[in-house]
Image: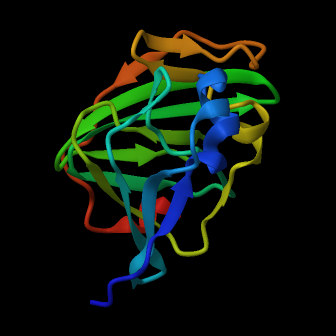
Amino acid sequence: MEIKKPDIRYLNDMKNVLQDKEWAKKAPNYELYYMYRGVKKEKGFRYNITVIPPRMLGKEFVKTKGHDHIGKFKEIYTILNGEAIYLFQKCKNKMVLDVYAIRAKKNESVLIPAGYGHITINPSKKILKEADWAVENCKNDYSFIEKMAGMCYYYTKSGWIKNENYKSVPKLKFKKPLKKIPKDLSFLI
């Protein structure tokens, strides 16, 4: 299998979605995480790998930028190494209709439902390596989360902090990860 070069997300790509804006103003532009897109493709699905080294972004734990899917696509992530917290939000305008988090460890999986924006957070001191299956023509939209300066909650050293740019944010709920993924991925469409 051919090893692909990763797309690299730098701190400057993330400054507008971070909780600790003062820290972000002074921080150098370094590499935060690595996205290996289309590592494998089969039957209309794309297999991606993301590697997120442990780090603090000021007071906040390192995370992905976050996105919504264009269309009604789902995605499924599996932890290959380390652990992750996935944060999901369903919004209408600046109102959050639903928000929940799932903490997953090695070999556990998480389903990204259609209509939910999401991020991955590395809350540990280990390198997080996650894989995901998505429909090949699934496109990501970063604009709403950028406009709102991040998701409706930030995960910090002090715990969860609400993002005040949202008009209404419900209490954060917690759900459990999946122990395995189905062999037939057609449910992602």
Is 104 left or right of 140, judged from the image as shown? left
Q: Quadrant of residue 162?
A: top right
**Image height of 124 relative to 167, above or below:** below
Please report the residue visible at 82 percent of the width from the left and 29 percent of the height from the top: 93
* Residue depicted at x 60% and y 66%: 138
Percent x, y for residue 57? Answer: 49, 31
**Residue 119 locus on image (x, y percent):** 51, 40
Q: Which residue shows up at 31% across the image and 54% down it?
A: 130
The extreme bottom residue here reads 2
Closer-to-camera residue (178/131): 131
- Give 83 or 24, whichever is nearer the viewer: 24
Foreground residue, 173 or 153?
153
Colour setup of the view = rainbow
Position of residue 19 measured from the top left corner of the image (x, y, whole percent): 60, 23
The answer to whether one can see residue 67 in this image is no
Asked whether residue 162 appears in the rendered view, the answer is: yes
Q: Left or right: 97 with respect to 34?
A: right
Q: Position of residue 109 (x, y in %)?
A: 28, 47
Number of disc labels: 0
Image position of 37 with respect to 132: above or below: below
Of the 4 image quadrants, the one containing the N terminus is bottom left
- In the image, taking residue 58 as reference, residue 158 lies left or right, namely left
